[in-house]
Image: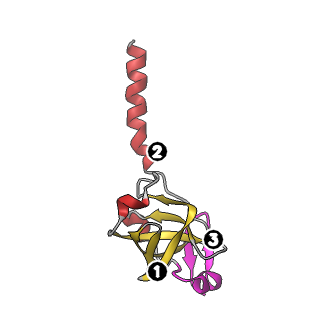
Amino acid sequence: MIRCALFAAAAVCALPAVAQMPRNFPANALRGSFVVTQPPNVLINGQPARLAPGSRIRGANNLIALSGTLVGQRYIANYTIDVSGLVMDVWLLTPKEAANRPWPTTPQEAAAWQFNPYLQTWTKP
């Protein structure tokens, strides 16, 4: 019984450490302001866009967030666009992640800059 209680306490103490692990973003992730207007419609950097079927939005805690719960709120986010031009993956950023600059906001910038996937940093030419 005591061992079970100690194990449970250790597991609860470890949860914050797991939640604070840094997230790795793909090289094709762009950054911008993200607002859900009327799901699946969104605004990215003030421009209308649409969420792809099967798209995923991850909150700052890295858990899945439903687009309906985010309506009207503005976030700084990293996102990917699928081959048909729809928004596929969205990561709502923590203040620490948002401070990681520079980060490309257009596909042209991403093509011209150099990405280090291990450090999660971009270098301008």
Mark closer to the observer (2, 1): 1
The location of residue 47, given as percent across then percent down, is 45, 83
Which residue is disc 3 drawn over?
Answer: 82
Per the image, the residue denoted by label 2 is 18
Residue farthest along the right direction in this orientation? 83
Image coordinates of residue 79 in percent, x first then y, are 52, 70
Q: Residue at horizontal 60%, vertical 82%? A: 107
Q: Secondary structure at mark 2?
A: helix
Image quarter of residue 45:
bottom left
Label 3 Cα crowd, 10 Å radius (few <14 / some 14-19 / many 20+): few
Q: Residue furthest left?
A: 72
Which dot marks residue 68? none
Provide the secondary structure element on which disc 1 rests: strand
Give the image location of residue 58, x and y in percent.
Answer: 47, 58
Magenta residues?
A: 104-125
Is there CB contact under 8 Å for labels 3 and 2? no
Within the image, what quadrant is residue 32 found in?
A: bottom left
Instruction: Find the residue positioned furthest to the top.
Output: 1
The verdict on residue 98 being magenta is: no
**Mark in front: 3 vs 2:** 3
The local secondary structure at tag 3 comes to loop
| Near-viewer residue (100 or 80) | 80
Q: Residues within 10 Å of mark 1 (few under 14, many from 20)?
A: few
Residue type, numbered disc 1: Pro
Residue drawn 67% across the image and 73% down it: 83
The residue identified by callout 1 is 48
